[in-house]
Amino acid sequence: MPIMWKLGIVTPPEGGFTMESARALLPTAILHLIAHVSACASFNLGSVSFMQVVKAAEPACAVLLLTIFFGKRYSALTWLTLIPIVGGVVASSSAEAGFSMASFLLAMTSNIASALRGGTSKDVQSRLGLKGVNLYAAIAIVSTVLLLPVSLAMEGQHLIPALKAAPALLKENGILLFGTWNVGFMAYLIIGSLFYHFYNQTSYVALADLTPLSHSIANTVKRVVIIVASLVVFRNPITTQGAVFAAVAIGGTLLYSLAQQREAATKMEKKMA
């Protein structure tokens, strides 16, 4: 993002990105860091489809935590939509062929951190004037600065041996980029990192260009696409019961989004009256 700011591809924050901004973003960046690290660790310990189903419980975590810590109030309809989300996640998890408690707990940690990050992001956005892509970029920069020394301290000694061993391991396991191209490990790592960054960044761009309702529906469809793609590409085993309750949980997230839109519209009507 600093390169994009410098080249003018993305309009930089007004007044630049200062140390004062970085300090103000610190709590949000820590939550962002926890959310992403725990999500990636969950991917490593469980299937992609299972992790995405558990991540569908994020709205439930958000409602509970924002009510407790930020004093937000939600309608009875919103609370009711949490029943299929929580029930679907619990039932789907119990039916998961390769259930991993560690993967489940890490995915829930990611949900909790993401929910709290959403609450603190609102405060930061109003105080600093950062929003959209620039807000995400600023949070990601601070998170990277925090993560780098920890990563080097914990795994730095394995870095060089891992880089040397990677080409042979890629060849041994027949790993090709998009199943077609034989590329070096660093190219694989860079391309994967870019995709992961743009996967998150485009969510902020979409939120700015779509209506909240359209964005909510798109986010629900995204989870379905990821789960189906993981079943097709990675051939993750999933039981019929697991698939049914996964659909219930994801459908619950859509109902939650619709309830939130209705609640927001009702509040707006009351203000206009």
Image (cartoon, grey):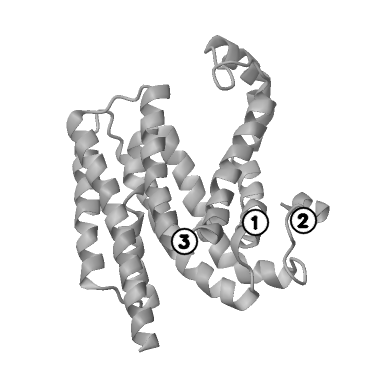
Marks 2/3: CA distance?
A: 26 Å
Q: In the image, what residue occupies the spot 40% across and 29% down?
A: 230
Q: Position of residue 198 (x, y in %)?
A: 60, 44
**Vertical placement of residue 212 versus 55, above or below:** below
Which amino acid lies under the numbered mark 3 shown in the image of this protein? Thr
Task: Identify the residue position indicated by label 3 in the image.
Answer: 211
Q: In the image, what residue occupies the spot 35% across and 81% down?
A: 269
Q: In the image, what residue occupies the spot 34% across and 25% down?
A: 236
Q: Earlier in the sequence, mark 2 or mark 3?
A: 2
Q: Position of residue 170 (x, y in %)?
A: 58, 16
Quadrant in the picture for residue 204 = bottom right
Indicate which label's residue lies in the foreground, 1 or 3: 3
98 displayed left or right of 173: left
Q: In the orientation shown, which residue stands out farthest toward the front?
A: 273
Task: Identify the residue position indicated by label 2 in the image.
Answer: 5
Quadrant in the picture for residue 161 = top right
Q: In the orientation shown, which residue stands out farthest toward the right?
A: 7
- Callout 1 touching callout 2 (CB < 8 Å): yes
Task: Identify the residue position indicated by label 1 in the image.
Answer: 137
10 Å neighbourhood of mark 3: few (<14), some, or many (≥20)? few
Which amino acid lies under the numbered mark 1 shown in the image of this protein? Ala
